[in-house]
Amino acid sequence: MPARTGKEFLQGLKDDRHIWVGAERVRDVAAHPAFAGAARSMAALFDLQHDTADVCLMPDPETGELINVSHVIPRSRGDLGRRHACLERIAEFSVGIMGRTPDYLNVTVAGFAGRADEWAAHDNDRGATNLVAFQKEAARRDLSLTHTIVQPTIDKARGDVPSPGDEIALHKVGDTAHGIVVRGARVLATLAPFSDELFVYPGAPLAPGTDAYALAFSIPMATPGLTFLCRDSYSVPGNVFDHPLSSRFDEQDAFVIFDDVEVPRGRVFIDANLAAYNSVMTTGWMPNIMQQTSIRAQTKLEFAWGLATLMAEAINAGTGTGAEMLGELWSYAEMTRAGVYAAEQGASEWGNGVWFPDGRPFRALRGLLPLWFPRVNEIIRLLGSHNLLAAPTSAQLADPALRPLIDRFLRGAKDTTAEQRARIFRLAWDFTGSALASRGEQYERFYLASSGRAFIRAQTYAAPDRARRLIDRFLKEELA
Ligand SMILES: Cc1cc2nc3c(=O)[nH]c(=O)nc-3n(C[C@H](O)[C@H](O)[C@H](O)COP(=O)(O)OP(=O)(O)OC[C@H]3O[C@@H](n4cnc5c(N)ncnc54)[C@H](O)[C@@H]3O)c2cc1C
């Protein structure tokens, strides 16, 4: 089956999945008020790939059927450039607010399948073969995947990874005739209600003796024993004038419980194999996925800058401190663009004929972006001040008695009309001040680990040669 339409995507969500939100188990995700807005957006995204087929679709290398470009296993810099164009188009759809649109895992899984040689190491040939088959299936069925790589937190003092005997973290409890049985929990499945399958793969490296926790697999959302506890919905059903972002882009996040879940043998990619688990994430995964995440982040930053500039124009606040803050916003967007460019220009073959970008610019961005995004929100709120909360609704604008008053007292500077001003400031509040915006800030801080952890990794991997050479000149000078 080739790339799906929105209608086909929505049809796929109708199954026996256990999705909980608030007090209820949701039987029909696309019809539930908590999810309907984002379900419609996801469907529109599936349709978008057909509308932009020249950018977003490519022939499957084996069947010739059209599949999404984000499934490409990059084998040249040109492939990465082609993928860039598709990822950018997808990011623009939600102005970067939906971080885990299906392209995120399409890119991840394609990168893993391309490095099947790494997955096959440590006696994991069967897992690697399963993974390569799964990547083809995911592309051909155009699956929407959610994922979990992080163990739940019970007691921070015990560290990030489970100790032998830990009953909370996801672990294998047995074999069956058809596969393996897993039990435990994982965080945090973004996009869960809008996914076809849950893909589980390695996170932080595990300690010796914890082989049972060393797992990777993919299973359909409706697999018996699988429960998804969604956070409160931040979707605001209603018109797009009042809540332009919250009405559309709440991608959701869910805690996942595995209550003795059977994973079919053919879908197991790592089966209690500690060495495989601890090695497959250590090479090309980061630069590969960072192309997707950084293009999305750059799109969101450029949107933020554009929105803030319009805000400033609407109330004539774009000089002095206003200009300074706008320039700061632009700089974040531009540095991210430059980082992506540098990483793509520096792309090379990482092994097995697979090309990934240069990891260095991405390692720097990885630590900086979680710091930049909260500052972006702060700038928009500083620039907007009370104006963010003095933006009439569509119903107020439509009221014949109120409209003349609003037009008179709530217009903007120069020739900015009251309606234009309301649109700009409502959009800005939905971007920085709504419940969805607050979740978005939390996402940017943590979705690929905190800034602190990212900087530690950056320092670990940084090549010191040139820096040492620059310093050695002074340290090795002959004493006079
Ligand atoms: C909105 C959202 C969506 C998410 N979606 C997904 C998803 O789809 N799939 C998935 O698998 N995961 C997802 N995650 C989970 C995410 O992967 C983790 O939250 C992330 O890895 C951070 O781990 P943690 O929450 O345990 O926090 P920690 O990493 O423990 O960080 C908590 C605090 O401790 C500090 N800290 C901890 N350790 C260190 C250290 N060594 N050095 C410096 N500082 C440190 C950090 O600075 C931070 O302030 C999501 C998280 C959020 C918030």
Image (cartoon, rainbow, N blue to C red):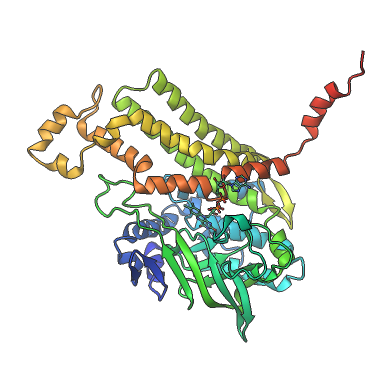
Residue depicted at x 69% and y 63%: 277
Seen in the picture, residue 142 relative to 473 is either above or below; the reply is below
Quarter of the image where the C terminus is located: top right
Residue 209 versus residue 157 in the image, above or below = below
Say which quarter of the image contains residue 192: bottom left
Residue at screen point 38% across, 67% down: 20
- The residue positioned farthest toward the bottom in the image shown: 177
Residue 231 place in picture, x, y as percent: 40, 59
At horizontal 39% and vertical 45% (from top left) the residue drawn is 437
- What residue occupies the far left of the structure in this picture? 401
Q: Say whether residue 146 is visible.
A: yes
Q: Is residue 42 left or right of residue 125?
A: left
Q: Is residue 4 left or right of residue 128?
A: left
Q: Is residue 116 visible?
A: no
| Position of residue 45 measured from the top left corner of the image (x, y, whole percent) | 41, 56
Residue 271 spot, x, y in % from top left: 67, 72
